[in-house]
Image (spheres, rainbow, N blue to C red):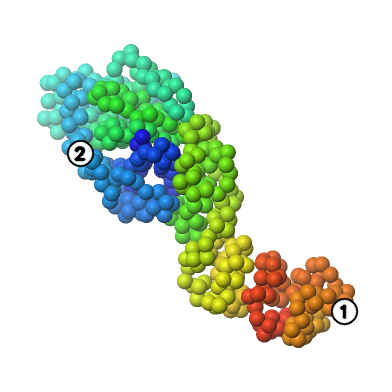
Amino acid sequence: MKTRFAPSPTGFIHLGNARTALFNVLLAGNKQGCFLLRMEDTDEERSKLEFAEALQTDLNWLGIYWQEGPEVGGEQAPYWQSQRSAIYNHYYEELIKNKQAYPCFCSEEQLALSRKLQRARGLAPRYAGTCRSLTQAEIEKKLAAGLIPSLRFRIPDNTIIEFDDLVKGKQKYHSSDIGDFIIKRSNDGASFMFCNAIDDALMGITHVLRGEDHLTNTPRQVMIFQALSLSHPQYAHISLILGADGAPLSKRNGSRSIKELREMGFLPLAVVNYLARLGHYYEDNSFMDLKRLAQLFQESSLSKSPARYDESQLIYWQKLAVQMLTEADFWHWVGPTIQQIVPKNLQREFFMGMRANFTFPSEAEHWARIFFEKVSFEKELQVLKEAGKEFFEIAENAFKNGINPQEVYSLLSNQLNVKGKQLFMPLRVALTGEKHGPEMAVIYSLLNKEEICSRLRKAGEIELCH
């Protein structure tokens, strides 16, 4: 088995394309097959090397590697379509020779007008066949006049095109419903429809998982394969990802690039575990690595209905991923700034006690600064005022005298008749400036006695200052 991912490097890779790449990797991994990466960079205006490099970086960050493709090489190199023109020209010539392709001199304005008239008549827009029957003399006359043609594939008459889709099931199309389509643009560039098919055949791709928006391209590509006596892969057209508004996922309704997710502090396995379940069912809902996800991946578990993007589910997997981090990986994740803030002798306590409170490195930095730089009471002044100066004097003196926290609680409860939130909330706010956070035991383990007393004293002075 050989699968592939063939993106156009015209921007940063987003969740939808990342999922397509992942599904192809998982399918190949499930069958101990090969995964290939190919750059479909025939759009000279929009394709950029920086996007191709960023795409490879993003895939590698997700843990996705290819056995054939850019940087790795392979028997079917090059893996950049812009470098495969000679190959495409060979097959163009074969189609022209067999009268399965012909030059088309129609301008974009003529084509647009034709489509408009067809729609007005209630017809599906397709090429009207204007240049289909041009004689050789007519073709030469137009060429002599300086007109530059595109090349169209000649759809066979009265033909049924059938193929089995691994997700959608048996598909059937009639050639009369498909107009002759462009396989080579007037600027000499190969069309996606053509070069995508040729490369899949020559590179030995056996299975293609791609978005269902490509489903209507498939009968056209099947005809290309048949015309050139090439084998075509088995297709699986996976459901699209929808945003919360029910529209296809886009930047407008929640989609982000993999680069953005990485910069936010998402962990790669969190993204992978989420995407693997977005349109594919796993009976095992535990956190898994790529190898295990591949072992349990099945074409039969691909959903026929659209998958819906849910940010809360991505966050769920992120939290699980953080809990799975080793201590070394944790410090690499949070970065050097936080490593410098947290004293070395307290780094293990910080990791063990605080990890459950973090989803992103920014939160780790927030708490590191609270414990080891400066506490601010600004957000929760009312809690301190309601507790009163005496509360904090009793607590400060108790801690100063080495009394353990449980005894401090009893002391405050007995002397001031406070319990529950009235007892614990003022202490939490005095020591962290926050109403919510780690367990009190963790707070005591990260603050020494002098710092605890200092913060309690400052909390007691709030009533005097305000």
Image quadrant in which you'd find residue 112: top left
Residue 23 location (% of width, % of height): 44, 40
Is 241 placed above or below 181 here? below
Residue 412 location (% of width, % of height): 83, 77
Total labels: the figure holds 2
In the displayed structure image, the side of residue 231 where residue 209 appears, left or right: right
Q: Nearer the viewer, mark 1 or mark 2?
A: 1
User: Residue at horizontal 11%, vertical 30%?
Assistant: 144
Q: Secondary structure at mark 1?
A: helix
User: Residue at horizontal 20%, vertical 38%?
Assistant: 85
The disc placed on residue 85 is 2
Image quadrant in which you'd find residue 399: bottom right
Query: Residue lying farthest top?
Result: 158
Q: Secondary structure at mark 2?
A: helix
| Within-10-Å neighbours for mark 2: few <14, some 14–19, many 20+ | some
Residue 222 location (% of width, % of height): 33, 25
Is residue 445 in view from this perspective? yes
User: Residue at horizontal 26%, vertical 33%?
Assistant: 202
The disc placed on residue 415 is 1
Q: Quadrant of the N terminus?
A: top left
Q: CA distance from mark 1 to mark 2?
A: 87 Å
In the displayed structure image, the side of residue 156 where residue 162 appears, left or right: right
Q: Nearer the viewer, residue 143 or 228?
A: 228
